[in-house]
Image (cartoon, grey):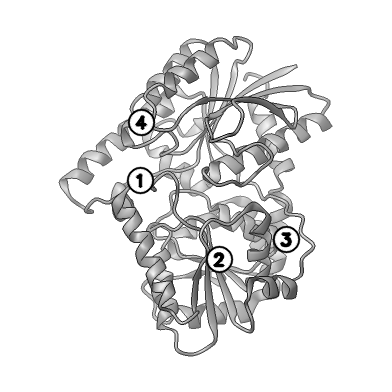
Amino acid sequence: MLPLLIISSYPAKGYTHGKGTVGIASYAKNTLLGIKSAAKKEANDLEITVLAEKLGDTPSQYIENNINVNRSWKRNSIFSYINLMWETVKRPSYNTVLFEFELAMFGGALSLIPLPFFLLILKILGKKVFLVSHQVVVDINSMANHVGIKPKGFKTKILNYFIGLFYRLTLATAFKVIVFEEYLKNELGRFGDKDKILVIPHGVEEFKSKITYTQARKQLGIRNEFAILYFGFIAWYKGTDWIVEEVLKNKGKNIKLIIAGGANPNHADKKFYLDYIKSIQDKAKNSNGKIEVTGFVNEADISKYFIVSDIVALPYRTFMSSSGPLSIALSFNKPFIVSDKLEGIFQNQDMKLALKSARLKKEDFIFNFSDKGFIKDLLQKYTKSIKRIQIFADEIKTQRSFEKIGRIYLENIYEKGN
């Protein structure tokens, strides 16, 4: 029996994608199911316990998919790390810890201060912590508008100093740090031992949906428009406002932008962020049907929005994490287009091989924020290479199935010497 302790946000019982949690939760559940499946095929018996956040009416302790879920910490609570320490210490046989970490998962910026000390204590106790860093932010200037501060000021200089210190301490105290992209490994590697950083690509979830393109369009009330899908939480760093403005400029082809998402629950208590959300919603209401903001999308409806779309757009202003919406787009073999800020996703080896196999270049997917005529560029890319993009997506989907990703985790976590 191999014990594995997980620290993560985790979806409510019976769900993979749920309201009140962010992408880290669905990723954690999909990864654990992939690890279990891979372990079963290799005749390894895993005992998995998840230390998750308290979540509404969800029971505090239960077993789901033969995974023990213990909801033992609460966001914005000063006791979260204490509770996690206690739950870890009272499980002495769990020497391997997989920590799914997102910068805002415990609360605001101050909640990051105890983390390196928490990791240090676990190290002293003999725990081997594999920290999965879902975000890597090396320069707060690239995120200034997202967090409500002015870029290139005294405050950003101070914050950048502490960001560097945080990553140095984290790399020193974790046994290994896992990121999803080679680009992010290189960014994080500035602050410590690069050999401690592993790259395991973001898994691609399998969605089982029998609804057709025509049926989905009928149910969602979309007629003959060319549907561009922006999926996920509304955010400045994701370029939500930028793509809204670009669609409003379009006077030609019948375009519809679907913003399938709403406010990020990690930031829903911040006035500047709520004002940003409202500005997007107001522009959508006054767009004469060109733009639709759906709000939170129920798990059962995720498939509909991807099936109904003609292309998925990722207009990110900064590259700090792998894209969950891109992963879902790959699930449905959907054409996609990314900003030049996400060019780094093509540094992963599987991406390079898939591009070669589909006879594509990364430029076939990329647009530049400074270019004029985003819609025209998007349509040209879509028309030119849709079939080859689908071949590319299918190959990446196969390589990044969560069962294969689970096997990679299993090999790295339980390899000899670990």
- Which amino acid does the dot numbered 2 rest on? Lys
- Which amino acid does the dot numbered 3 rest on? Asp
- Which amino acid does the dot numbered 4 rest on? Ser
Q: Is residue 252 left or right of residue 79?
A: right
Instruction: Give x and y (percent) for residue 47.
Output: 71, 21
Mark 1 or 4: in front is 1
Distance (Cα) linking label 2 and label 3:
16 Å
Q: Is residue 212 left or right of residue 337?
A: right
Task: Give SS at disc 2.
Answer: helix
**Is any atom of residue 23 visible in this view?**
yes
Distance (Cα) linking label 4 and label 2:
38 Å
Instruction: Give x and y (percent) for residue 302.
Output: 64, 58
Q: Nearer the viewer, residue 410 or 197?
A: 410
Distance (Cα) linking label 4 and label 3:
40 Å
Q: Earlier in the sequence, mark 4 or mark 3?
A: 4
Where is mark 2, residue-wise? 362
Residue at screen point 40% across, 78% down: 286
- Which amino acid does the dot numbered 1 rest on? Asp
Where is mark 1, residue-wise? 269
For label 3, the crowd category at 10 Å Cα-Cα, with few meaning under 14, some 14 to 19 and many 20 or more, is some
Residue 111 has which mark?
4
Instruction: Give x and y (percent) for residue 340.
Output: 44, 64
Residue 394 has which mark?
3
Mark 4 or 2: in front is 4
Q: Earlier in the sequence, mark 1 or mark 4?
A: 4
Q: Nearer the viewer, residue 204 or 215?
A: 215
Mark 1 or 2: in front is 1
Mark 2 or 3: in front is 3
**Is any atom of residue 142 visible in this view?**
no
Residue at screen point 50% across, 79% down: 289
